[in-house]
Amino acid sequence: MEELYSSKQVADILGVNESSVKRWADSGDLKCFKTPGGHRKFNKSHIYDFANKYSYNIPELSSLSVPQQSEIPFSFNGSIEILFKKLLNSDEKEVLEFIYSFYARGIPLYTIFDDLIKPCMTKIGEYWFSGRLKIDDEHVASYNLMKSIILLNNKISPAIPNGLKAVCGCLGKENHEIGILIMSNVLKIEGWNVVFLGSNLPVESLSRSIKIHKPDLVCVSTTYTTNPKIFLKDMEKLYETSKKYKAKLILGGENRINAEESRHCDKRTKSIKEVYDYLNENFPVK
């Protein structure tokens, strides 16, 4: 009898997320069978064909056991410095190809965002703050990064629409848009319908968008707050509106105000991996 593998088993073999396997199967990149109950099943030929086409190094498959994902964490080593230089000296298409090369090798998107792009964003900010980077160079780097993130979203085949909707934006005088853009693109790739509102939004505008669109999820990002008291009051209002319309509220970003901020949202996240974990726990893929 032919040995068939589940999405989770194939994810372990390739060393990727289960959601990536499901997305590749739904887009046709990774062939599969579907059971009468709608579950994806893969044979050895499906797995080997995909691995050969996209240069995945996998061991011989055995009908007795399924290889597990390596416990050795991936290291970007000097890639952060390379990306930093490309953002300053290349166009967005070259930046995109560099970032996408890691995804094509099977590195999870959350790892790319958290361990490559985020440290590079931090480095850009530190260089600008210390005067080692002029404001025009900072703008060029930020623009190239934003454009490449948008292009990355277009390059990756999204999952089948899951019927869920999210509203994403930056509250108050928050002008750092890259974090919420990343969160928005993650949701789109996972099959969400996303209403992207951008940066520098009054709480009234975000609340109005919740009332109009009635999302399942509201995502807010914060990097810097000029007035923490006002920000917390606005978060409290936004949380009440979210609960009224039965939406979950995620607050992301590096801004550290105080422990009270966690009371005004369903989840406080500091990484894209935490966002993925929250989505998988509260909005599981069927």
Image (cartoon, rainbow, N blue to C red):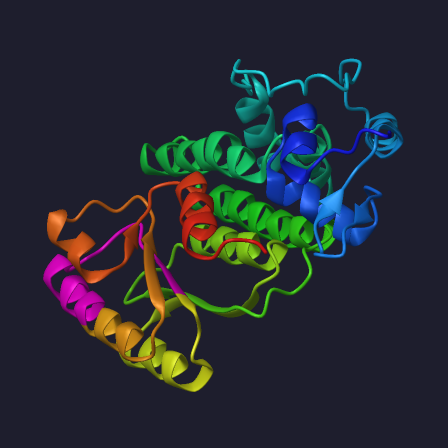
Location of residue 26 in the rendering, given as x and y in whole percent from the top left corner: 76, 53
Residue 32 lies, in percent from the top left, at 82, 44
For the point 52% across and 31% down, which residue is it? 116
**Residue lying at 15% horizontally and 60% vertically, measured from the top left:** 227
Residue in the picture at 34% in, 48% down: 253
Q: Position of residue 121 (x, y in %)?
A: 45, 38
The quadrant of the image that shows the N terminus is: top right
Judge left or right: residue 45 versus residue 176.
Answer: right
Looking at the image, residue 153 lies above or below residue 243: above
Residue 140 in view here:
yes
Magenta stretch: residue 51 in it?
Answer: no
Q: Nearer the viewer, residue 71 or 229?
A: 71
Q: Is residue 224 magenta?
A: yes
Residue drawn at the location 36% of the way across and 33% of the way down: 126
Task: Write the start and end of the magenta stretch as one range.
Answer: 218-236
Q: Is residue 216 left or right of residue 87?
A: left
- The total of numbered circles placed on residues is 0
Q: Foreground: 4 or 208?
A: 4
Q: Quadrant of the C terminus?
A: bottom right
